[in-house]
Image (spheres, helix red, strand yellow):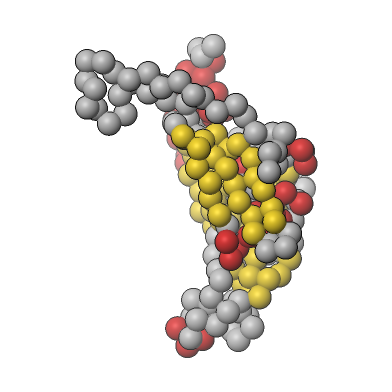
Amino acid sequence: MTDPRLHEIPDKVEWDVKHPNKFRGNVKETGIGFMGYDYDSTTEQFKVYLHYDQLYYWKYAEVSKLGKGFIDGEFWGTKCPKCGDKFFPPRVNCWNLDDNLEKTEWIKLKQEGIVHTFTIAGWSGKSSLKRLPFVLAYVVVDGCKTAIANELRNIDPWDAEFGMPVKVVWKPEDERQGTVTDWWFEPADGWEPTVGDTPEKERMKELCAPVYEWVKSMD
Ligand SMILES: [Zn+2]
């Protein structure tokens, strides 16, 4: 199946003639690119195509509902029918040893969560360099027992807090690819930083300042 969103696949590879045995030669680094997806509604299998020097695909297999959910703007997690633990990202089997790998059931989750922990990124891959510095957060979604990592946008990095409430914001439907890059977190509506300026915030501002300067110098 060809998806109209599939990019053209590079077909030229330049080998380093001086070092022909070097594994990667001087192949130009193109970075990772998500190319498209397909979904088989009969088997409910969801597959994502990505390009990193060559074309790969990645099967969601038993957690296909997660990837298909991203396309539809839905969060699907799993729940253990024995102990009630909820998981997002989903786990196929319960992790509690007493539950003897009990098979979990799918549940649709609320698109809200709490920041468990976070970091401020001062360096990144090529595709997001110009958006530095940004916040990467591990978020517990809708009372789950596992946390999921994604970017926390629309916040000054030094204002991020442990335990802050967040909401989910989606890319437009026709740009989604069935991956975590289809969405990101933002502070929940009405949220305000609970503390004013603190020495730690001042320290973070100082650390971010040269990053902002550096980003401004990029073309
Ligand atoms: Zn369980």
Q: Identify which residue is drawn at 31% across, 29% down.
A: 24
State whether residue 49 appears in this view. yes
Name the spot of residue 143 as percent of width and height, x first. Answer: 64, 68
Q: Identify which residue is drawn at 46% across, 34% down.
A: 54
The image quarter containing residue 25 is: top left
Question: Which is nearer the eye, 184 or 37?
Answer: 37
Relative to residue 205, is residue 22 drawn left or right?
A: left
Q: Identify which residue is drawn at 57% across, 43% down.
A: 49
Q: Identify which residue is drawn at 73% across, 59% down.
A: 41
Q: Is 113 above or below relative to 103?
A: above
Q: Quadrant of the C terminus?
A: top right
Question: Which is nearer the eye, 105 or 6?
Answer: 6
Question: Which is nearer the eye, 214 or 63?
Answer: 63
State whether residue 162 appears in this view. no
Question: Which is nearer the eye, 127 or 66?
Answer: 66
Q: Quadrant of the N terminus?
A: top right
Relative to residue 52, is residue 130 drawn left or right?
A: right
Name the spot of residue 32 as percent of width and height, x first. Answer: 50, 34
Mark count: 0
Name the spot of residue 165 as percent of width and height, x first. Answer: 67, 54
Q: Is 169 above or below relative to 29?
A: below
Name the spot of residue 150 as percent of width and height, x first. Answer: 57, 47
The image quarter containing residue 12 is: top left
